[in-house]
Amino acid sequence: MKYKYKYKNSTADFWQLSMYFIYGSMIGICNTIFTAAMILLAIRIWSDVSSFVRMLLALSIFLFPIFQPLGIYIRARKQAAASREIEISFDDGGIRVKSDQTISDLDWKSIKKVSKKPNMLVIFSTTTRGFILTNKVLGRQNNEFYHYLVSKMNH
């Protein structure tokens, strides 16, 4: 069985991936608790504080739901601009990645993890680097391809 995809990750792909990992972790839980606590605090003390403190409360409420995703988007835009179109193929022998004039071969043992997110699969070749394959790229092969990856990693 063989799978082959040619794609270039977009700003939205990098942004979504970062948001999945932030809000799917302890950091995301802390961000949510902080925002909820600041909303409750603002409701409780709003009428008793100065305009400066109100401004600080408002900024702290918008920190994680507005400013953090905006900052992540700016970083994702830089990542997308630096990324290149790649052609990646998967077969029983491993993974072959072609980018510009570079060809890399990875065996299945070098794959550390496959992470399935609602709109993408992330194949990690190290703990911090990997390949993002969106559902748009995978098409109808999404579930079949995921099961193929998992079966190859378990051998």
Image: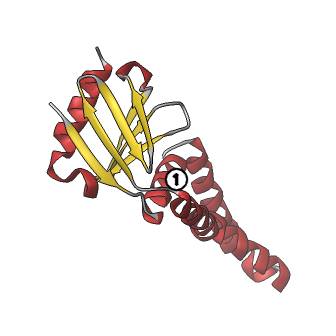
Q: Quadrant of the C terminus?
A: top left
Could you tell me residue 119's position as x and y percent?
A: 32, 54
* Residue farthest bottom in this picture: 51
Q: How is the image coloured?
A: secondary structure
Could you tell me residue 28's position as x and y percent?
A: 56, 50
Residue depicted at 45% across the width and 26% down the height? 112
Q: Is residue 134 above or below residue 80?
A: above
Could you tell me residue 20's position as x and y percent?
A: 46, 51
Residue 76 visible? The answer is: yes
10 relative position to 150: left or right = right
Q: How many neighbours does mark 1 have within 10 angstroms: few (below 14), some (14-19), or many (20 or more)? A: some
Q: Quadrant of the N terminus?
A: top left
Label 1 sits on what residue type? Ser
* Residue farthest front in this picture: 101
Question: In which quarter of the view is residue 95 placed?
Answer: top left
Q: In front here: 25 or 86?
A: 86
Residue depicted at 46% across the width and 56% down the height? 84
Q: Is residue 16 above or below residue 150?
A: below
Q: In front here: 18 or 104?
A: 104
Residue depicted at 65% across the width and 56% down the height? 34
- Residue beneath disc 1: 18
Residue depicted at 49% across the width and 60% down the height? 15
18 relative position to 99: left or right = right
143 relative position to 38: left or right = left
Could you tell me residue 36's position as x and y percent?
A: 60, 61
Q: Is residue 13 above or below residue 154?
A: below
